[in-house]
Amino acid sequence: MALDYEIVLGDAKIKNAFLQVANEDTYFKEIIFAKQVLDNSDALQKCDKNSLRSAIFNIALTGATLNPALHQAYLVPRKGKVCLDISYRGLVKIATDSGGVIDVDATVVRDHDEFYYEQGLTPALKHIPCIEGDPGGFKFVYAIATLHNGIKKFIVLSKDEIEKVKATSQAKSGPWSEWYDEMARKTAVKKLYKLLPQTDRMSTAVSVLNEHEGLSKDSQVKALEVMKRFDDKKETLIMCPDKQTMVTESSCSGCEKIATCNARE
Amino acid sequence: MIGLYPNISHEEYHKIEAVSNSYLSRLSRCPAAAKVPQTETPAMLFGGAFHSLLLEGEVAFNERFVVAPQIDKRTKDGKAQWAALQELGKVVVSAEDYDLMTEMANAVIKHPFAIKCLAEGRSETSVFWNDPETGLYCKCRPDRIPDGDHGVIVDVKTTVSADKKAFAYTVNRLGYDRQAAFYIDGFNAVCSGSVDAFIFIAVEKEPPYKVACFTLSDGDISVGRMKYRDLIEREKGCREAGEWPHYDDEGLVELWMPNF
């Protein structure tokens, strides 16, 4: 009898989704890769089947492969769900395959490297890695993309900025602690991508990654902080017929026209 | 003219030549598009009237707009009525549109957070500054700057969908992130760095007029900043060359066909 996950993998809907963006050959290969991973992982087998379905869908939509030899994408269990994790290498492959850019690359700058960059009217970036002795700790990460017209775009992120992303990620303990550089490079590529010609595949890949890291849905840091600024003033608001705007109760009470005003009626 | 100007009328503001967010939007199509004279579309007119009604109140609204009753322009009486309306020198808003914007405004002020954002504050203050890097003269006109040090700029957006995901697409497509960064930087250029957040009050144009308040993370604001910096530098280049070409690319571009 077929196991649950085998039924999901054989699902006609998954096949159809695949065939819309890739050929049958790719479909069979990816299903076999997925089955190999699932066969060997109790944790993945126990996960929610719908999440497995959407992870496989995302393979089709992004055009990444689960081929273990290529290290592009992985199925990983997280909180009872199967997540598709796309590696740095996978992300670069999707960005170039999907046609938005000719090339994209991200590099980590260490403390003892020689590094200089300039933005503005004449952007420039120079990085000479330290090749002798200890290069030191993580200092910056930068991503450079080459567009079809030959123009290069880049962004530089400091350690602080990367730490901010890490702090809002749910994948803090896993990938961020084990593969900090790779996560930083992925972050730089994701951020640079926002400035590049957008493609469906790459957009899917970025949202898959953000979802995997818990970045898209749970990051309410700024919203909560801004909302708090308004919380200190818990005064009732009254429509002022004179100013034609809402005013706080205290400023309404202090108004010289209060005796003749009907705002509070 | 540098700084905050609370008492500049819409007409005066639009006459002042400076780089605005909508100028940058057009520039992003191709430089020549920025130079095409703008005519007000019905959608822009509706948006302007709705903003005035919601943010400035009925008195200010009635100064600029006049609501047209149901007029049958085929009859003699109707024609006379219509001509009389035109003579007022105000923008005519149809009764239907006025009802619609009243419903929308009522929906907005029922949103608990939206009403906090729209409570006491300055509406439609004009901001003028020189971009520090390029020296270009810029302007913007935030919908609302709440009183008290909230450090926010509030912008009201009429939209097809106030859904979180759909609105995020709209922000990307229409460059609202770029607008947010441009406004924040402009305001801070004349008010010593006091603003760091941008709030969108999104209201749908169809019943039940769903309302949602959104903000962008610092990271997304910085992306918006890069987007506007690119454009402002392109404008600077155009001015130096004295040319606003009607193309982005001077060479041959190979099409990339997506998987349809």
Image (tube, rainbow, N blue to C red):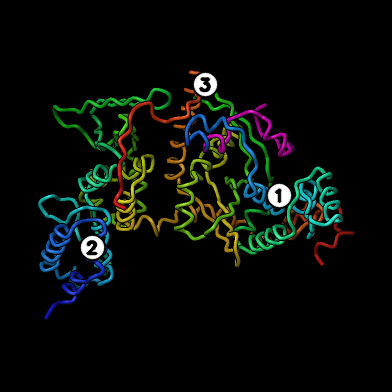
Label 3 belongs to which residue?
B239
Label 2 belongs to which residue?
A56
Spatial CA distance of label 3 from label 2 is 51 Å
B66 is within the stretch colored magenta: no
Q: Position of residue B238 (x, y in %)?
A: 49, 23
Local crowd at mark 2 within 10 Å, few (<14), some, or many (≥20)?
Answer: many
Q: Nearer the viewer, residue B88 or A39?
A: B88
Q: Are marks 2 and 1 in contact (CB under 8 Å)?
A: no
Q: Are marks 3 and 1 in contact (CB under 8 Å)?
A: no
Look at 47% across and 35% down and name the residue there: B28
**Can you tell which of label 3 and label 1 is closer to the viewer?**
3
Disc 3 with disc 2 on a shared chain: no
Q: Chain of mark 2?
A: A
B19 is within the stretch colored magenta: yes
Q: Chain of mark 3?
A: B
Look at 18% across and 51% down and name the residue there: A72
**What's the magenta region?**
B1-25
Q: Return the mark for residue B52.
A: 1
Q: Nearer the viewer, residue A120 or A254?
A: A120
